[in-house]
Image (spheres, rainbow, N blue to C red):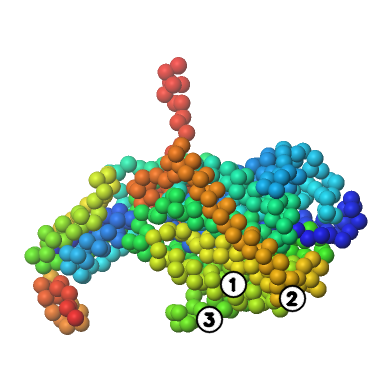
Amino acid sequence: MKLVIAIVRPDKGNDVLEALYRAEVRGFSMSRVQGHGGELERVETYRGTRVQMGLSDKVRFEIAVSDAFVEPTIEALCEGARTDEVGDGKIFVLPLERVVRIRSGETDDSAVTPVRS
Amino acid sequence: MTPILAAAGEINAGDTAWMLAATALVLLMTPALGLFYAGLVREKNTLNTFMMCAAALAVATITWALVGYSLAFDEGNGFVGGLGHAFLNGVTFEPREGTTIPHLLFFAFQATFCILTTALVSGAVVERMRFGPFLIFAALWSVLVYAVMAHWAFGGGWLQANGTLDFAGGIPVEMGSGFSALAAALVVGSRKDYGRQALLPHNAMYVLLGAGLLWFGWFGFNGGSGFSTGNAGVLAFVNTLLTPACTLFVWFMLDLIRGRQVTAIGAATAMIVGCVAITPAGGFISPAWAMVLGALAALPSYAVIVWRTRTRVDETLDVLAAHGVAGLTGIVFIGFFAQESWNGVADGAFFGNAAQLADQLVAAVAAPVYAFFATLLLLKVIGAITPLRGPGKEEAIGMDIIHHGEEAYATGEGAMLILPEEPVEEELAVR
């Protein structure tokens, strides 16, 4: 089991959702974050005050998957989020010790596999 | 627009006072429209959308003073006025012919109409059109389309000479902006995510606030279009209360029937539709018929909004439905229900004067055709000189950052002040 964390452009968020859906990755969380990843900093001006915006808006996906789903998930994230410009974001894959589904007490692989209705 | 029964060549203090206030009321409508539009777009395009209205405040005021007013209101031929009043030549404290207010004030009141109408068209191209080309478009459109159509309807042009009735701008303002918007949407093209992703309004409260302020300003727009405190102005003022209220109520019912819920953004739209519908008819129909007009006007505009979102035409903020179609409804309604006992000018077909309906129908055909094709041509020409929109990645980042270098909702987190470079090293070197 791995925890896949992806930081992507906010305007590619919907494309990522679409790609994940097509890859049948159905369980994840999504949040808005701000950060810096070495991309060019943009300069904004407010009433003559020039400021360099050190943080860019990004969207962060957290996806816990069983081992078989790691590669499809990464592929889907890349496919959905890539524009070939600096600032497309990053994917972090972390080992996952334990997962518990609160409702049923199921653990690990059966807990990260979404319930099929 | 309406004959004023007063001694020629005399300024009336009451009329002038009201028209000063009405002019300010109409000017407020442009920032109000900015709020209405800004709420309807996505967060990343908030400032750009408002700035298109600000652009109209700047550009259309200048073009109107330089040539627009003259082309609309100076004597000329049936199609366009002359250049006798260009650069405000001869526009002074003397009353304008047929009114009891200073010519200069008459100019300013009409200027606010030109500004608002130019800003209205932007609703078709928000979230994608580049700001620079929009400024060029606004300048040329305010002269080539608005001023020409204002001449037709108000300045002694062929429609007015024919007997077509338009109290406060159903022809140049509402049909002019609505059908131009359709052309602009077709030339500029859809937003890159249109039809693929849900593009939702980012702040419904701005939309409601903007609509409310527009309705408020519309009392000056319609109430001032009699250029006096006379009966026609009072009638239009009161009808501006009655018609939108009826539209609003019918819109609630349509929403209920269609979706089982009454929507807030629908309500904001309904206020605009009602105000638009009474614009041409304000001083010509009785209060009772104005209420009927309000109820009726909801139907075609509602239908066009429902239909438009199912097409590939990204006429983004539905200027055609809210302004073009509702304005057309109002213009045609006059042909049926104008009432001489109320307006002192003419009866409609319902009161035995079928000729009036014919005059109204001529305008209902000619105005959309001219607005649509003139705007289509104008944007094609501008588009041949400079691209109307940027690359897709700029659209993805958002127009606020790309074109204005600002964000509507900047948090300031991570923002570092750039101080002007201090010449420290140079001083040291000199020493």
Label 3 belongs to which residue?
Answer: B253
* B117 left or right, relative to B69: left
**Which marked residue is nearer to the observer: mark 3 or mark 1?**
1
Tell me the CA gap for discs 1 and 2: 21 Å
Q: Are marks 3 and 2 on the same chain?
A: yes
Badge 1 density bin: few <14, some 14–19, many ≥20, Cα 10 Å: many
Chain ID of residue with mark 3? B
Q: Do labels 1 and 2 share a chain?
A: yes
Secondary element at tag 2: helix
Foreground pick, B260 / B254? B254
Residue B228 locus on image (x, y percent): 81, 60
Callout 2, which amino acid?
Phe
Q: Can residue B69 be seen in this view?
A: no
Label 1 belongs to which residue?
Answer: B297
Callout 3, which amino acid?
Met
Tell me the CA gap for discs 3 and 2: 30 Å
